[in-house]
Amino acid sequence: MNLEALIPSAIDGLMLGFVYGLAAMGLTLIFGVMRVINLSHGPVIAVGMFVVYTLFTGPLAVNPYIGILAALVFGLVFGVVEYFIAVDRVINEPELTTLLATFSVNLMVVGIATILFTTTPRAVDVSLGSLDAGNVTILGTHVVSVIVAIVVAVALYGFLFRTRLGKSIRAVANNRAAAELMGIDSRRMLALAFGIGTSLAMVSGALLATLFPFNPLSGASYEVKSFVIVVLGGLGNPTGALVGGIVIGLLEGVTTVIIPVSWVPVLEYVIFIGILLLRPQGILGARA
Amino acid sequence: MIRYRIPFLPLAVAIIALIAAVPILTSNPSLREELFLVFMLVTLASSINIIMGYTGYVSFGHIVFFGLGGYFSFYLMQVQGWHFLAALLVGAVPAALIALLIGMAILRLRGAYFALATVGINEATRVFFNNFEPTGGAVGMFFNFSVYLQYGGAKGAGELAYYVMTVVALATIATSYAIKRSKFGLALMTIREDQDVAMVVGIDPARAKVAAYVISAVFPAMAGATFFFKNGIIEPNVAFELLRSIESLVMVVLGGIGTVAGPIVGAAVYEWLRGFLITNPTLANFQLFLAGLLLLIVVLFITAGLVGYLRNRFPVLRSYIP
């Protein structure tokens, strides 16, 4: 354990935490609105990575940060379509049914992505220089990721709390029957919420693509990480998810210096189970 | 009443035993391998059905008991030099104890929280064994070749494993049937429908649920012990593979959740289908996609599963197929 390594590692983890948090917000939004644990979350993150990759390596060589916008839009469309195909019909069934329905999408997406891109690791080569301060080096790509994550999170909040559509989604989340009595088309709101959740996951994937190498199976580890974060922040609570993401990122950054890297996930899962058992509402308390 | 005179269990056991005898009588090792896998999947699906189908708790990370049983008995065989059968039986004990502890802790959670907790437990166990040096860490453990000598070499060991897996599968089916027909089973199904009602009629939900959970953990532990004994090697990412866990849920749903026959049919059909897809040259690439598509169709349109569909379609079958 040395302090020299601790600070840069902690800063790195903290910044990464914003990106984790963004993905987890998508997962928790879907759960909060419709009580569905989206098991296609991981592959959707991977699709976000490949949207950026395909545009970047394509004939137009689209800048990865413009690719993120594409991932945002594509995620929205993808999520709405997925909702109507796989979720809508079983939305009122017990959770096993929706778990398996979204898992079937998981299989299909991974199947197609593996055929299209194989499992060879890919990378989006982007460099934005770095900031140096003493022994701390902050990569430009990390800074931009944090900024994007914050902008998207703020935009989400603006949408959910300031617009009529966003308020309708929250109304449906709160009480579907009452919302329908107020003239809200709950089915459309559920689809939109699923689209937004998927979109958040894709943007997070798009950001991760600029940071690390990836392949179609990379989504799985981020999916499990999102579960941990979501439980930490309280299922269905987007603010909690962002905070949880930052906590997990920071935790990873700090603990990798203190204990061997491979033990870090053990710690994460112990926290995960502990929170579920002792404080199932998450660290931030009551649901938003 | 006449309908209780139709003996499902003896009939099912006889049919399965007959099928199990085919590769031995015709000395067809590849068919034997195939059936070994099917019996293992039947064991996993049937036992998950006890906690999920009867009791209504979606145990997503149930494969953890398969891995634990495998690890405990493998350790006894490799490091302590135990005989396979002894290791199998003794190895299931700590797995059951762990199930008891886990069950008491997490069966208080309902719905999605329970499902997520089981995933967390499986993943925690997997990464733990990845780091735990006494069992070989991420590399795992493998047999010295001499271990198989007392069973007549690898061939003899393979045959022994096959017989044991058949017996374990039959025991699981018998247990599943017995539970479904017992007062205990009724208690579980009452909990599934409404836990508060269950308490009102004098059921202790906590005890019944934990009992169901432990029972549903013992058989996967034995299946794991047998599988890794035959394999000769055990590593964490194979022993605690979440995908296998989800696959057994799929088999239960495919066959018919909450029925005795459903998981058997589901496991057989699933494995047959996978074998078909993998060996078909044009479809092999699309295997994962087609598996997903099929699952979606079953989930959306045949919610009761194959057996459930038949039972609903032809009510007379209800007295024949539990």
Image (tube, rainbow, N blue to C red):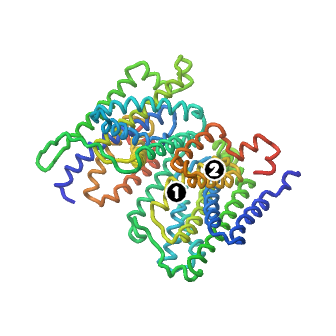
In terms of image quadrants, where is residue B83? bottom right
How busy is the neighbourhood of tag 1: few (under 14 within 10 Å), some, or many (20 plus)? some
Q: Can the viewer see residue A179?
A: yes
Q: Residue at x 33, y 35 (%)?
A: A55
Residue A44, how many percent across, how many down?
43, 39
For this rendering, which residue is in front, A240 or A124? Answer: A124
Secondary element under disc 2, as helix, strand or loop, is helix
Chain bearing tag 1 is: B
Residue A126, how many percent across, how many down?
24, 41
Mark closer to the chain start, 2 or 1: 1
Residue closest to the far right: B2
| Label number found at residue B183 | none
In the displayed structure image, the side of residue B86 where residue B236 appears, left or right: left
Residue B3, how many percent across, how many down?
85, 51
Chain bearing tag 2 is: B
Residue A60, how many percent across, how many down?
29, 32
Q: Give the vertical position of A262 relative to A242 (above or below).
A: below
| Label number found at residue B252 | 2
In the displayed structure image, the side of residue B91 where residue B304 appears, left or right: right
Q: Give the vertical position of B201 relative to B63 (above or below).
A: above
Q: Name the residue under label 1.
A: B102
Tell me the kind of residue under disc 2.
Val
Tell me the kind of residue under disc 1.
Ile
Q: Which quadrant of the figure contains the C terminus of chain A? A: top left
